Image: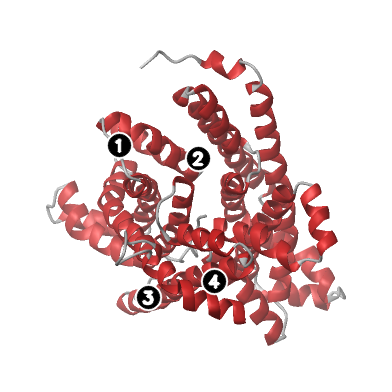
Amino acid sequence: MNPLDFSVLWRGDYPALIARGMVTLLELTAASWVLAMALGTLLAFIRMSRSRIARAFVATYVEYHQNVPMLVQIFLWYFGIPTLLPQDWQMWVNRNGGEFIFAFIAIGLAMAAYVSEALRGGIRAVPATQLEAARALGLNFLQSFRLVVLPQAARIALPALVSHTVLLLKNTSLAMAIGVVELTYATREIESQSFRTIEVYLFSTVVYLALTLLIMWGGSRAEARLRLPTR
Amino acid sequence: MQDILAILRDYGMLLLVGQYPHGPVGGLVITLALSILGVALAFPLGVLMALARISPYAVVRLPAIAVIAVVRGVPLIMFIFWVYFFLPVLTGRPISGFTTLLVTLVIYEAAYLAEIVRAGIEGLPKGQMEGARAVGLTYMQAMRLVILPQALYNMVPAMLGQFVSTVKETSLGYVISVNELTFAANQINSILLTKPFGVYLILALTYFAVCFTLTQLARMLERRIARRRAGARPSTPAASPAATVPASQNA
C-alpha cells in the first residue's frame, strides 16, 4: 500500500465538501439537541402528572422511540410521512431540503425519549419533600417544577444527559442514508472519488472522536461547576 | 389499514425469512441471527476487555481504555465502513456483507459489554475479593470462581438491554446491503413505490415487537435479581450502581 498522504484532503473541491459535511453535522446535532432537550423536559413534566392517560401517552412515546432503530425512524419520517401531507406542503418540504428537516425531526424526537427518561430518573431522585416545601412556600406547581425540582433533577441526570448528547452526535451519521451531506456522507463521497480510503476515513474518525471527547470533557466540567455545595 | 394488511399478506414472508426457500435467507431471521451471533461472540471478548480495563497493570489497562473510548466515541456506521474496506485487505479475499457486519458488531458490542461487566464487578462489595484472596485463591482464581459469577449474574438484565441495542444496530446493515429486515423493507418499498408509509410503519412495528418484548423481559429479570440480592443480604440494599437496564443505549 502507498504511504499515507493526507494532502489528498486539500485537493480540488474536497475541502469544500469536508467543510460542508462538518457544518451540517454540527447543525444537525445542535438543532436535534435543542428539540430533544425541550421536548424531553416537557415529556418528563407530563410524566409527573396525576392523569393516567397523560402518563400512559408519555410511556408509549418513550417505548416506541427506544425500541425502534433510529435508522428506521428516519426512513419512516423521510419516505413515509410526506405521502400523508397535502401536496403543496410536500413541495415546500422538498424545495427546502427535506432530508435535513426530516433527519432533524426523527433524531430530535427519538432523543427526546432518552432525555425524558434521564430526567425522570433525576426527578425521582429529588426528595418529594422538595416539591411539598416549594408548594408550602406559595409557589404553584409549574413554578415549583421549574425553580426547585428541575434544577436538582437536571444535575442528577447530567451524566446521562451527556452520554445521550454523545449518542445524538453519533446518530447524526445515520442521516447519510437519506442523502444528508453530513460528515459520513462527505467521507464516502471523497473516498469513492479519490480511493484514498485510509486517509479519508482516518480523518473523519478522528473528527468524530475529537467531538465526542470534547462533549464528555465539557460534561465533566459542567458537572464540577454545577455541583451543589450540600451534595 | 387496508394497505398494511395487503402488504403483510403479500410480503410478510419476505420480511420474515427473505427469499427463502427460493433464494437466500433474509429478513427478520438474518437480523436475529446477526444479533445472537454478534453478542455471543462479543461476550468472551467483552469479559476479557473488562478484566483488562480494571487490571492493576497499566500495560494492559491503557490499551483497553483506549479501545473502549474509540469504540464509544465513533459512530457505528464508520466502523462498518472500516471493516468493509479493510477486512478484505487483511484476509486477501472478498468478504460478504453478513460477515462484515458480524465482525463490526463483535468489536463494537465487546466494548459496550466490557463496560457492563466492569460495572458489575465494581458493583460488588470489596469484601468479596478480599475474602477470596484471604482464603488463598490467586487473583485469577478469585475472579473466575467468586467475582465473575456474581458480577455476570447481576448484569444479565443490562446485557439483555445490550442485545436489544444490537438488534437495532443490525439495521445499519442496510448501508452495505446485508439482506436483513430493513433491507427487505426497502426492497418491498421499491417494488410497491406508492406505499412507503405502510411499509416503514410495518418495519418499525416489527422491530418494536421484538425489542419491546426483550426490554420487558430484561426489566422482569432485573426486579427478580434485585429481590434475590436484597433477600440474600438484608443488611446491604440491592444497589449496584449499574444494575438498572440502560433501556438499550444505541442507534
The kind of secondary structure element at disc 1 is: loop
Callout 4 and callout 1 share a chain: yes
Q: Chain of mark 3?
A: B
Label 4 with label 1: CB-CB less than 8 Å? no
- Report how far apart the C-alphas of labels 4 and 1 lie in the structure: 34 Å
Quadrant position of residue A181: top right
- What label sits on residue B94 in the rendered view? 1
Discs 2 and 4 lie in a common subunit: yes
Residue underneath mark 3: B221
On the image, which quarter does residue B236 sit in?
bottom left
**Residue topped by disc 2:** B74
Q: CA distance from mark 2 to mark 3?
A: 31 Å
Instruction: Name the residue carrying label 4.
Output: B202
Rendering coords of residue A161 (x, y %): 62, 54
Q: Secondary structure at mark 2?
A: loop
Left or right: B164, with A98 as reference point: left
Q: In the image, is A86 to the left or to the right of B8?
A: right
